[in-house]
Amino acid sequence: MSELGPITMRDLSLIPVERLRGVGPKKQASLAVVGITHLLDLVTTYPRRWIDRTNEARIADLVPGQEALVLVTIRSVTKRTTRNRRSMINVNVGDGSGRMDLVFFNQPWRERQFKEGLHVALFGKADTYRGGLQMSNPVVDLIGDRTGKIVPIYPQSEKAQINTWEMAGWVEETLRRCAERTIADPVPEAIRQRHRLIDRSEALAGIHLPDDMKTKELARYRLAFDELLRVQLVLVLRKRALERDSLGIQHTIGGPLVKRFYESLPFPLTGAQTRTIEEINADLGSTQPMHRLLQGDVGSGKTVVAVAAMLAAVDGRHQGALMAPTEVLAEQHATSVRAMLDGVTVPDPGNLFGDRPLRVELLTNRVTGADRKQVLAGLADGSVDIAIGTHALIQDTVDFSSLGVVVVDEQHRFGVEQRAALRSKTANGAVPDTLVMTATPIPRTAAMTVYGDLDVSVLDELPPGRTPIVTMWADGGLMEAGVWNDIKNEVAAGRQAYVVCPLVGESEKLEVASAEETLERLAFGELQGLRLGMLHGKLRARNST
């Protein structure tokens, strides 16, 4: 190993791409178009897929009607214009076992792309045409003269005119130059062994120049670990910096208002609720701002815990805010919180009666005119104790007198900037305590990126009398038909049902069911005869009530 020591990622970021052979001013400009200016950019631009030449088909083996991957050489290219003035590019290709024709409709640029003798990878469905094989509009990857059992395919840009074999050559040269010193690995060997991770040098070589597909997967696993580690470190550093540099609010725990709230509840708190409230209270009693995630299934009692946190703020003459992602959800929260706090009054020594009403207000874009002005004035002068709303809470026109506790429902619908904007809505410079609620089961790796800067409390116990939620997967048409029959039986018994779709309208990019499409299908199909309605955030207020 060189006396200079291993090469770090920072070292690579300081070496411009023009130091590589074949990267002159023109190629340098082309690489810049796709965001590659230094060697770190280059080695972290990974192949978008890999061609396993040990499993590739030959033209002679193609079965009409079945998709396959073949590596071929361009023999000839011709262009003609059809009767409707559309261009048609015909390409003849071969691989030693036979020949085949390709046809591309309305893609005139293909004539410039294909040159005689060029090696390309084709993925598509071959059909019989005039006694021979033909592929229409197959997926094409230019691989140049790349050899080896596994051929990496890099993102290619027609605009930048960067080819996959050029990228592969530059990456190969970079890794070869790094080989003597090796590439520094910040993950200790003991950690790598525990998690079965290969080292970083091996991973970069394995992702770009794998000997087999298993090597590529080991490399991908390690590099994915690195990306998640970087995200986690950034989030932890951000959290630590916020704790170090931010002035928090030290709330008084166990105040009279919170005690009145507990006494007014018609049911005892569960053990899980008691535990999470204690965890939250420890944060509220600290001088550092709270950043905590409250995770629990629907019906586990998250709202009670959130209300207790906001009332702790009101006990100290601060305010609470609950932000939801949609107007419908904000209105539901307002209704349930007001019902929960019905009859609970705030101790007020300055009041003739010793108490004053607890003021809970809703603020969404539906609240307009005089009502909106009244709510905004109450937030600014402190007479509103708890505000419940949507993004309207973080608009420039909204000012709080002293925002003490922020509750954000379904945080994955909000960005970090939006959460920070709500935290900044305080006039005294102190950072409010933040509690994030979610009922969504989130994969562990996704949770690291969404909630990585938060401490976690879990409600893992349902209140007495709550029916446990059973989740089933309808796999196939027969099981799905059973779901619709169950819904019809429930409606016949006087109950209701709802169907959740990932999209409102159809999408060309996502092959998932939309609400509009599903409603139409069910209304004239499986649920014909039932009263069906549609509810989503794009509906006008008068249509969604």
Image: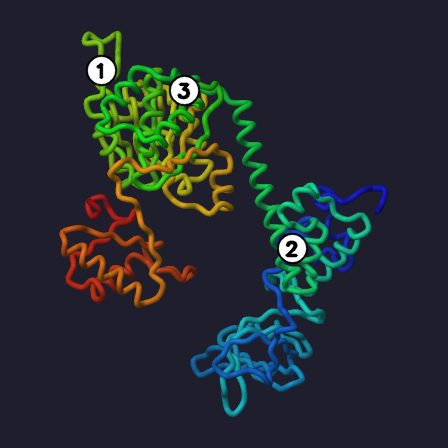
Q: Position of residue 420 (x, y in %)?
A: 45, 32
Q: Is residue 31 visible?
A: yes
- In this rendering, position of residue 232 left or right of residue 14: left
Task: Tell which tag, 1 or 3, sits nearer the viewer.
Answer: 1
Where residue 164 sits, quadrant-wise, is bottom right
Disc 3 to disc 2, how far (Cα)? Answer: 50 Å
Where residue 468 sits, quadrant-wise, is top left
Q: Earlier in the sequence, mark 3 or mark 2?
A: 2
Looking at the picture, which amino acid does disc 3 mark? Ala
Relative to 141, does residue 426 appear above or below in the rendering? above
Quarter of the image where the C terminus is located: top left
Q: Earlier in the sequence, mark 2 or mark 1?
A: 2
* Residue that badge 1 annotates: 356
Q: Residue at x 65, y 49 (%)?
A: 197
Q: Earlier in the sequence, mark 1 or mark 3?
A: 1
Q: Position of residue 525 (x, y in %)?
A: 22, 66
SS category of the residue bearing label 3: loop
The image's mark for residue 427 is: 3
Q: Residue at x 29, y 56 (%)?
A: 515
Task: Tell which tag, 3 or 2, sits nearer the viewer.
Answer: 2
Q: Residue at x 19, y 7 (%)?
A: 352
Looking at the picture, which amino acid does disc 1 mark? Arg
- In this rendering, position of residue 324 left or right of residue 148: left
Looking at the picture, which amino acid does disc 2 mark? Ala
Disc 1 to disc 3, how far (Cα)? Answer: 24 Å
Q: Is residue 14 visible?
A: no
Closer to us: 319 or 223: 223
* Residue that badge 2 annotates: 219
Closer to us: 99 or 459: 459
Task: Tell which tag, 2 or 1, sits nearer the viewer.
Answer: 2
Closer to us: 453 or 100: 453
- In this rendering, position of residue 348 left or right of residue 409: left
